[in-house]
Amino acid sequence: MRYCSSCGGPVRLQRPPGDDRERHVCTVCGTIHYHNPKIVVGALCLWQDRLLLCRRAIEPRAGFWTVPAGYLELGETAEEGAAREAWEEARARIRIEGLLAVYSVPRIGQVQLLYRAQLLEPEVAPGPESLEVRLLSWSEIPWDELAFPTVRWLLERALALRDQDGPLVTVFNPIPAPSSREP
């Protein structure tokens, strides 16, 4: 970042008072510009003994399979965002049942909130971000064609817990906890 989005002045990296890291700070108006992770929301959508997968029409990983998911929008809850993404990507109307997994992916600046949901009807169709959508049995999952590691982790978790009801949250953070010694 070179210029302030508030006043247009130049910014520089510095540690604001009381902060523990360098931030982009405007040299004119003093605005501190925080760059924080994006929140991704999505859902593993089920219809009887089948699950919904979407073949991506967009990068990254166009042509590979995923669950409907995307960035949370301002002004919506995580559950509303997951339902919106299901509609946008697969024209699927869903009922959220519970949080299935939370994945922290610091390498790409994301926190993913992934839910288990029931399709309200089996009719689905590709939205603008999907080449095709399918309701698949668990044995039909194209494991070698999944778009992202988190999709695999989610499907493996859901498969292991598919007969359980309610919130089934798992939290996965690939980064080890910091040591007791602070830098």
Image: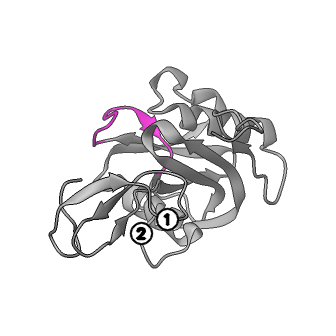
Q: Name the magenta segment's main secondary structure.
A: loop
Q: Which residue is mark 1?
A: 17
Q: Is residue 134 magenta?
A: no
**To which quarter of the image does residue 79 belong?**
bottom right
Part of the protein shown in magenta: 57-68
User: From what the image shows, is residue 170 above or below residue 120?
Assistant: above
Q: Which mark's residue is nearer the viewer, 1 or 2?
A: 1
- Identified by mark 1, the residue type is Pro
Q: Position of residue 160 (x, y in %)?
A: 78, 35
The extreme bottom residue here reads: 75
**To which quarter of the image does residue 8 belong?**
bottom left
The extreme front residue here reads: 17
Q: Quadrant of the C terminus?
A: top right
Q: Position of residue 179 (x, y in %)?
A: 74, 35
In the image, 70 versus 88, the foreground residue is 70
Q: Is residue 66 magenta?
A: yes
Helix, strand or loop at mark 1: loop
Labels in figure, total: 2
Q: Residue at x 24, y 66 (%)?
A: 27
The extreme top residue here reads: 144
Q: Which residue is mark 2?
A: 73
Q: Earlier in the sequence, mark 1 or mark 2?
A: 1
User: From what the image shows, is residue 67 above or below residue 63?
Assistant: below
Q: CA distance from mark 1 to mark 2?
A: 31 Å
In the image, 138 versus 28, the foreground residue is 28
In the image, 81 versus 46, the foreground residue is 81
Q: Position of residue 115 (x, y in %)?
A: 64, 56
The extreme left residue here reads: 8
In the image, 13 versus 106, the foreground residue is 13
Q: Residue at x 19, y 54 (%)?
A: 2
Horizontally, residue 129 falls left or right of residue 39, namely: left
